[in-house]
Image: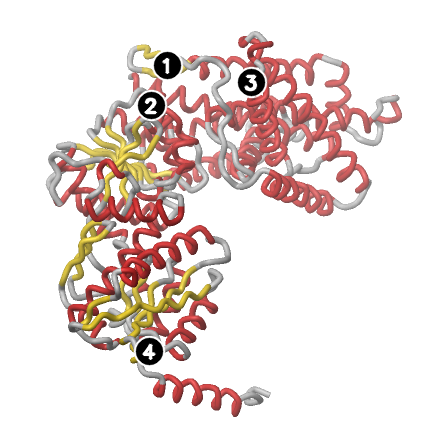
Amino acid sequence: MSFFFQQLLNALQVGTMYALVSIGYTMVYGVLTMINFAHGDIFMVSSYFAFFFSIFFLRMTSHFPSFLVFPTIVLVTVILTSFLAIIIERLAYKPLGSASKFSAIITALSVGILLENLVLALIGPEPHQIPPLIPDVVYNLQGVAFSSFQVLILAVSFLCMYILDFIVYRTKVGMAMRAISFDKTVVPLMGVPVDRIIEVTFALGAAIAAVGGIIFGSVYSLDPYMGIRIGWWAFIAAVLGGIGNVRGAMIGGLILGGVEIFVVAYTTSAYRDFVAFAILLLLLVFRPTGILGKSQIKKV
Amino acid sequence: MKYRYLLLRVLISLYLIVFACVVPSGGTPTATGTVIKIGLNAELTGSIPKVGKSCKQGAELAVKEVNDAGGLEVAGQKCKIQLFVEDNEDKADVSASVTQKLIAQRGVLAIVGPNASRNAIPASEIAESAKVPLIGPWPTNPKFTIDSKTGQPKKYAFRLMYLDSNQGIENAKFVKEEFNASKVAVLYDIGSEYNKGMADVFKKAFEELGGSVVAFEAYSSGDKDFASQLTKIKAANPDVIFFPNYYNEVSLQLQQAHKLGIKAIFMTTDASFSSEFLILGGKDVEGACLYSTFIADVASASPIAKKFIESYRAAYGEDPDDVAALTYDSFGVLFQAIQMVGKIDSQAVRDALATPHSYEGATGKTTFVGTGDPLKSIYWIQVKDGQFRAYIPKNYHP
């Protein structure tokens, strides 16, 4: 039984990571019907931001209470990453105007490659790891091992997802986003500043990916190409959940993480991706629009 | 157009052939005695200049030591060694052309280098057709000693490095005997040829020794979460876990294994023998075991290795790495072969190298068994206090 719960915890950890990144894909798709393939690389850059801030703040602990280090790093990384997303939107996507969807996808891919190579040139290909931000204690409950940091990141992830869900479904900005995804031509006539809302959408998607970036860099490691795999998997999670739907992306991420972990746990690991994606394909055969994606559903 | 430079090409080829015939092979009699010419083909520039530098320094030290002692004694006569150093720029085509140059223009007796397999393979083909022995200190690719056209072993290519497959077998024996392990687990990257090959060889060898592989878990290249596989491994309760992966992944894997509370012995390969492994892994790689052909750890070194480390430090102000030690030993092997036959002749030296014999050097014992692929003694290493330290086996006997 402890084996099952340990794997469930593993699945939660991997799943929340996919969920945090997939939200950005789904939100941008919602308002622009465009797949922002640079999103995985924005996630990667956010991890590097967190890496440098953590080194900086951990040196400053003499002037700085240590329990504030983690929240401060989350805050500055989230803000900086949101600004990066807004800059990318203004410089790369907005000038495209009403050009075809293909131009937007090519531009997004190019921005991604640009970010990867920029980090590669400035920092280098060596992997790094964010130093421990809180004292890491490993607990053992009935044979299930979990660490204090794991508890913290799961709490932070779910809190952030809750905040985002609140913004999208309970605030005026969120309502405007959902309205734009519903009908792009009528909404501006109602006095909604569409350009501003699009920027907010990019910023929010990047902000929640940045939370993922901090966690990923602490639990695993960061390198210039880390965004590629996570980006693809998160994109798949977004499609699985029903692209355009924020709650769908969260559910899609958790399901993808669960499938990945439990396929290894109960079948042979050599066939992990094969079995996992066969299951996902089957799911999409029966629900082509994803789990929560209905053609009439209110999109973000 | 195709035949435009045909005449020129034929002339150059003829010139080279005639030149190669005219220039006496290997030794030139001079007033003070015979000089032995040896070529060095190293990666001095390009993507791995550190390897080339170590190679050159190891070579120069080996030659200097012999020349300072008055030369190499061949059939009662002291012969000085003359070293010709060529840069292959870490390019396969340049490697081939400098090998050609060393043979045709310099008339060397034998060549040491290149190090990287990608350069050593084309160089070995040139040496093979020119019938000049070539000793690669570092190449691990099986193709270095196998003729790609016939599939037969090459006659003139020798390496100082162990083959990865031989190493996997020895590693299984080490794990079995040294740690008295009966149950092992393996975690490997299924998308990488090296990792998968090492995992398979280890599994087969360990099972042949009577042990059981209780978990054989794979992941895909680029994965950073191994929790699921490690949880499975933990449930199988192995004595030793083998990680035949690259250092950046192994450090993460050990970290995650510790977080899950796994208490087994961690074993990895020479792919983790990098200072980055210690930086990335921190306290999680403490106690991990691995191996290499050489480690500059004077405390545990044999007298020959100790002398080499000390004279290398005195000459260059740094610790020798594996390439430097292997190059140094390549020259030792070559000198021993020359003395064995007692004459300065490429064919005779080749025959001596191909005779089963062994050589005791800085990297331990190298045993030639009639082919280009020797059996080598291995340095076992353990991470201790954040440093790589030689590990002296207690129960394992090679």
Q: Residue A59 has which mark?
A: 3
Q: Residue B258 has which mark?
A: 2
The residue tagged 4 is B129
Q: Indicate left or right for B206 with A170 as reference.
A: left
What is the spatial separation of the Cα atoms under label 1 and label 3, in whole angstroms? 25 Å
Mark 4 packing: few (<14 Cα in 10 Å), some, or many (20+)? few
Q: Is residue A182 above or below residue B220?
A: above
What is the spatial separation of the Cα atoms under label 3 and label 2, in whole angstroms? 26 Å
Mark 3 packing: few (<14 Cα in 10 Å), some, or many (20+)? few
Kindly indicate whether the residue at mark 2 contacts the one at mark 1 (C-beta within 8 angstroms): yes
Q: Nearer the viewer, mark 3 or mark 2?
A: 3
Look at label 4 and name its amino acid: Ser
Q: Indicate left or right for A123 with B103 as reference.
A: right
Return the disc, 2 or 4, that comes first in the chain's sequence: 4
- The chain to which mark 1 is attached is A
- Residues tagged by mark 4 and mark 3 found on one chain of the structure: no
What is the spatial separation of the Cα atoms under label 1 and label 2, in whole angstroms? 9 Å
- Quarter that holds the N terminus of chain A: top left
Circle 1 SS class: strand
- Quarter that holds the C terminus of chain A: top right
Kindly indicate whether the residue at mark 3 contacts the one at mark 1 (C-beta within 8 angstroms): no
Mark 1 packing: few (<14 Cα in 10 Å), some, or many (20+)? some
Look at label 2 and name its amino acid: His
Return the disc, 1 or 3, that comes first in the chain's sequence: 3
